[in-house]
Amino acid sequence: MAAFAALRTEEGRALLAELRDHDPARELATATRLRRSHPAELVSAALGQARLRQRAAAKFGAEDAYRMYFTPNGVEQSTRASVAEHRARRLAGLGVRSLADLCCGIGGDALALARAGIRVLAVDRDPLTAAVARANAEELGLADLIEVREADVTEVDTGGYDAVFVDPARRGGRGRIFDPEAYSPPLSWAVGAAGGARFGAVKVAPGIPHEAVPDEAEAEWISDRGDVKEAVLWFGTAPGTVRATLLPRGDSLATADPLPDPEPGPVGRWLYEPDGAVIRAHLVAEAAAELDGRLIDPTIAYVTADELRPSRYATAYEITDVLPFNLKKLKALLRERQVGVLTVKKRGSAIEPEELRRKVKPQGPNAATVILTRVAGAPSMLLARPAPAPRD
């Protein structure tokens, strides 16, 4: 707390501004120079905060990240700004005007909610984390809409709020926690807190088993530029619905009555790789139905079709070769076609992309994609190239 308070002094702010673009590789020399004119403890704190801001820029954007303050756990566990903004827009669209943000961390979600015009009570039991969240609200000009309270979330009265959002801690001393009841607080408590409000949401790991989703919840999996970021259990919206939302466009595939998996069949000219959120939401069949597609294997989430159709939920590739898995044959084929730029994708294969690249040693001016997978149960290699962009 003392080091954090020092960073918010005029001297601390000046140091942070000076360190905005510093090179971490030269940190020792930078620290030696700065300690000639500043207390050593302040220099150490400023260098640590500068590193955190550089890491946070990818998640929050440089404009916000270099005005905010972070803790190591806060950078790691906070919601990406684009995802927080999506959730805030949805809550605002439901008519939510006040919300209790429980386990608020460094305030990433609270900031997005306040920018959407929602009044927020942000609660965290860790004194430093709460102080950082309060500082971030002040630095971004949102303190009038965000009240930060240092408290145990299980003891906070949320009765006067339109909505409750809970972001339980999903990491412990040994890393990620996979059992939802081992979250802090447990998933069952979070569901009770969120489900007791007019609207509620609980942030959970994207790998949450579908059987752990309460019947009264809507489950949404969210990806950002192809990377699955999180899942959310919604209450008061559409019970029993599963949804995949793809950012930044915001395309959403949802159903309360999932289709059966399509029948597998032979590999056609086109292969579609569903977005990770679609796969996590168990909506591959819905994506395949839009493409008039089939699976290449009953256990693999690749869809194939004979005609190219635009899809908002899958990336298309044109298949040039379908081969049994054989590294020697692949190496010879890549050498023959002078492939030096090799993109490796895998699903249902034990070999790692970097291992394959080392073994085939691609060389040449051309590019290709190799997909390591199973076709009708057999280990296979598909050579492909990205489908042409659809014409306007």
Image: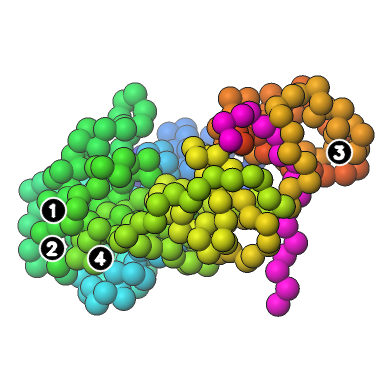
The answer for how far apart the CA atoms under marks 3 and 4 are is 49 Å
Tag 1 near tag 2, CB within 8 Å: yes
Can the viewer see residue 9? Answer: no
Tag 4 near tag 2, CB within 8 Å: no
The mark that comes first in sequence, 3 or 1, is: 1
Q: Secondary structure under badge 4?
A: loop
Tag 3 near tag 4, CB within 8 Å: no
Q: Mark 1 points at which residue?
A: 193
Of discs 4 and 2, which sits in the foreground? 4
Q: Secondary structure under badge 1?
A: helix
Residue at (75, 62) in percent of width and height: 388
Q: Mark 3 points at which residue?
A: 339
Residue at (43, 63) in percent of width and height: 253
Q: Please rate how many residues cluster around mark 2, counting C-alpha atoms within 10 Å: few if below 14, some from 14 to 19, many from 20.
A: many
Please determine whether, in this image, residue 173 is positioned above or below residue 171.
Answer: above
Q: Where is residue 220 in the image (x, y as percent from the top left)?
A: 35, 56
The mark that comes first in sequence, 3 or 2, is: 2
Q: Mark 2 points at which residue?
A: 197
On screen, residue 97 versus residue 4, left or right, reads: left
Going by the numbered disc 4, the residue's amino acid type is Ala
